[in-house]
Image: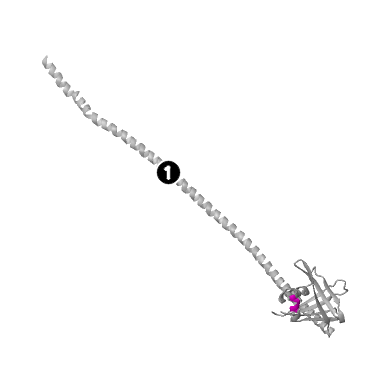
Amino acid sequence: METRHTCLKLEIPDATDPIFAKGTWFQTHFDLSITDGLNAWLCNASEEQVKDRAAQWDQPVTEYIKLAERYLGFQQPGSVYGFTDAADGCKRLSWTFEKEGTKLEWRWKFGPAPNSKKVTAGILDFLMDANIRLSDEVVTKTQSFERLKVETQKCLAQSERFKNEKVEFESAIYSKFLGVLNSKKSKLRELRDKLSKQAVMGDLQQEEEESTDKTESFDGGSDDDKSEEQPTKDITSTSIGVPASRARGRKRISRK
């Protein structure tokens, strides 16, 4: 696990000035340094000390360090911090937290730093470096945001152009489709009219053929009747012919 660094500006109740607490966190132990701008104090928690404290609270070492880093890396709302005097110029840092409905308090004792200026300068350097890194990160993120904003505007303009082109294309396609549809409808109407006319002409032709058949049937019957009556007519005309009547007349006269 890599080493982590934190620096916290602590607002202590009933204190005139805040203090700065810098922490260096390892896997099994941690180092803390505190300054009020004039004096400095140190707390180097060894592996044995951390293990003993974790056992007192029935916690694994890693969980204990993680919880301490959480409260000394960022000031937690609802937690009461204290930085009080102890014997021999020492200080005691404390903070409270709740666990399973029970309010608990952790305390660590700090001894005076052999060189307060060096500790204070180290904390200030860390804060300056962190500020520079944050400033660079802010500038980088701001530039990225501006580039993203420009790209977003381009995308919006392109999307609007695509939208307008889509609307124009759909309108043109719809107009062409209507033209083709109307043309097809007109052709269908023409075909329907032709079919209707052909059907009417077919009906008329069929009626004429039927009428012609009936007429021919009627005329054929008259010719047959005439052909049957023709011999009778001939016989009659022969019997009333002039030569025959004369012959009979002469014969009668001779008898007288």
Q: Which residue is mark 1?
A: 199
Where is residue 90? Give x, y as percent: 85, 80
Q: Tell me where residue 104 sits by quadrant.
A: bottom right
Q: Residue at x 50, y 52 (%)?
A: 184
| Vertical relation: 18 (above or below) 238 | below
Say whether residue 172 is magenta. Answer: no
What quarter of the picture does the C terminus occupy?
top left
Q: Residue at x 67, y 65 (%)?
A: 156
Return the residue nearer the eye: 236 or 207: 207
Q: Main secondary structure of the magenta part?
A: helix
Q: Tell me where residue 224 sits by quadrant.
A: top left
Return the residue nearer the eye: 2 or 144: 2
Outermost residue toward the bottom in this view: 114
Return the residue nearer the eye: 101 or 35: 101
Where is residue 60? Give x, y as percent: 71, 75
Colour scheme in use: one colour
Camera sees residue 151: yes
Where is residue 86? Give x, y as percent: 86, 78
Q: Residue at x 71, y 71 (%)?
A: 145
Residue range of the region highlighted in magenta in the rendering:
50-55
Q: Residue at x 47, y 46 (%)?
A: 193
Question: Within 10 angstroms of label 1, few (less than 14), some, or many (20 or more) residues?
Answer: few
Helix, strand or loop at label 1? It is helix
Name the amino acid, label 1.
Ala
What quarter of the picture does the N terminus occupy?
bottom right
Camera sees residue 139: no
Q: Tell me where residue 64 sits by quadrant.
A: bottom right
